Image (cartoon, grey):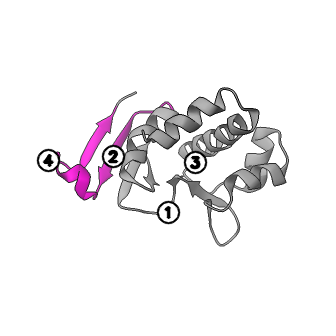
């Protein structure tokens, strides 16, 4: 886990707005893992009992959307990358190799990781199994 992510998590414990940001990402990731389909912003907003504007402010500008305006992901995504994370039998993808290691922990699921990252290959394999 990168230092900036760790600092953000510590901050989330004491600052309500940062805690809300983590809540948005956590809900989005759980919804992606459970459905393996794009998530409508309205469905995420409803699950969070929040306003569309507040949720969208957390997601922008990094969130990925499909052609219909549904969320594909934020860090953990349905859009294929070289970092595949298989959760609950569904293929999802991470933006970077380190994400593949803590995304399963955040969603409290075991995962199989397949990465074409040269940094991971130096350990002798392009896949790992993360058990939670």
The number of discs equals 4
Q: Which residue is mark 3?
A: 32
Q: Position of residue 58 (x, y in %)?
A: 71, 51
* Residue farthest along the bottom direction in this orientation: 67
* Distance (Cα) linking label 3 and label 1: 11 Å
Mark 2 or mark 1: name the one nearer the start of the chain: 1
Given residues 7 and 110, the one toward you in this image is 7
* Distance (Cα) linking label 4 and label 1: 26 Å
Given residues 7 and 126, the one toward you in this image is 7
Mark 3 against mark 4, which lies toward the viewer? 4
Mark 4 or mark 1: name the one nearer the start of the chain: 1
Which disc number belongs to residue 113?
2
**The stretch drawn in magenta includes residue 19:** no
* Distance (Cα) linking label 2 and label 1: 15 Å
Given residues 45 and 11, the one toward you in this image is 11
Q: Quadrant of residue 131?
A: top left
Mark 3 or mark 4: name the one nearer the start of the chain: 3
* Distance (Cα) linking label 3 and label 2: 16 Å
Q: Position of residue 75 (x, y in %)?
A: 52, 52
Q: Which residues are magenta?
A: 107-130
């Amino acid at each position: 886990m990168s230092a900036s992510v760790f600092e953000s998590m510590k901050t989330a414990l004491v600052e309500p707005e940062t805690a809300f940001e983590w809540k948005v990402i956590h809900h989005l990731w759980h919804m992606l893992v459970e459905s393996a389909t794009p998530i409508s912003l309205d469905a995420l907003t409803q699950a969070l009992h929040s306003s569309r504007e507040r949720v969208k402010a957390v997601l922008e500008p990094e969130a990925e959307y499909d052609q219909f305006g549904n969320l594909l992901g934020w860090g953990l995504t349905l859009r294929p990358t070289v970092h595949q994370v298989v959760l609950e039998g569904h293929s999802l993808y991470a933006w970077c190799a380190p994400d593949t290691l803590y995304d399963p922990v955040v969603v409290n699921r075991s995962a199989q990781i397949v990465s074409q990252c040269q940094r991971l290959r130096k350990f002798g394999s392009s896949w790992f199994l993360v058990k939670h």
